[in-house]
Amino acid sequence: MSLRIKRVYEPAELTDGYRILVDRLWPRGLSKDKAHVDKWLKEVAPSTALRKWFQHDPAKWEQFRCKYRAELNGSTAFGELQDEIYRHKSVTLLFGAKDEEHNDAAVLRELIAERSAK
């Protein structure tokens, strides 16, 4: 299984495989045709309150990671995401944030890797 993360604004590539948008809000200025999203799983995204608190501030990153992971514990949406990932050879989690290191998709990839290793 191959799991990558990528900004949804970047061009789609064959190596992306199955493309899942993991943001709660649809990316600004991007049509559904241009996004090439196979599935939009907005329920797995951070809660609105957590997203607004974080505001993609790298100084809040560690706290955000902990709080978001706590939200994902027992989440049916996270279980659905895992099922989608295991159904496909290659999956790319798409996000809209400009910061490619400090975003929800990075946390999801990290958590999925940890659970796959068990």
Image (tube, rainbow, N blue to C red):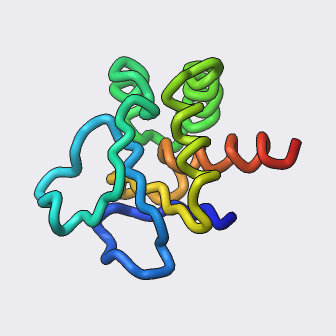
Image height of 96 relative to 90, above or below: above
Q: Quadrant of the C terminus?
A: top right
Residue lying furthest bottom: 14
For residue 52, side relative to residue 116 (left or right): left
Image height of 51 relative to 84, above or below: above
- Residue 73: give x, y in percent of width and height: 64, 21
For residue 69, side relative to residue 105 (left or right): right
- Residue 45: give x, y in percent of width and height: 42, 34
Count of marks placed on residues: 0
- Residue 70: give x, y in percent of width and height: 63, 20
Residue in the image at 32% along x and 35% along y? 24
Residue lying furthest right: 118
Q: Quadrant of the N terminus?
A: bottom right
Residue in the image at 31% along x and 77% along y? 11
The residue closer to the viewer here, 21 or 95, is 21
Residue lying furthest front: 87
Instruction: Quadrant for residue 71, please give it.
Output: top right
Image height of 14 relative to 17, above or below: below
Residue in the image at 38% along x and 62% along y? 7
Residue in the image at 31% along x and 59% along y? 37
Instruction: Quadrant for residue 50, please give it.
Output: top left
- Residue 97: give x, y in percent of width and height: 36, 52
Image height of 17 relative to 111, above or below: below
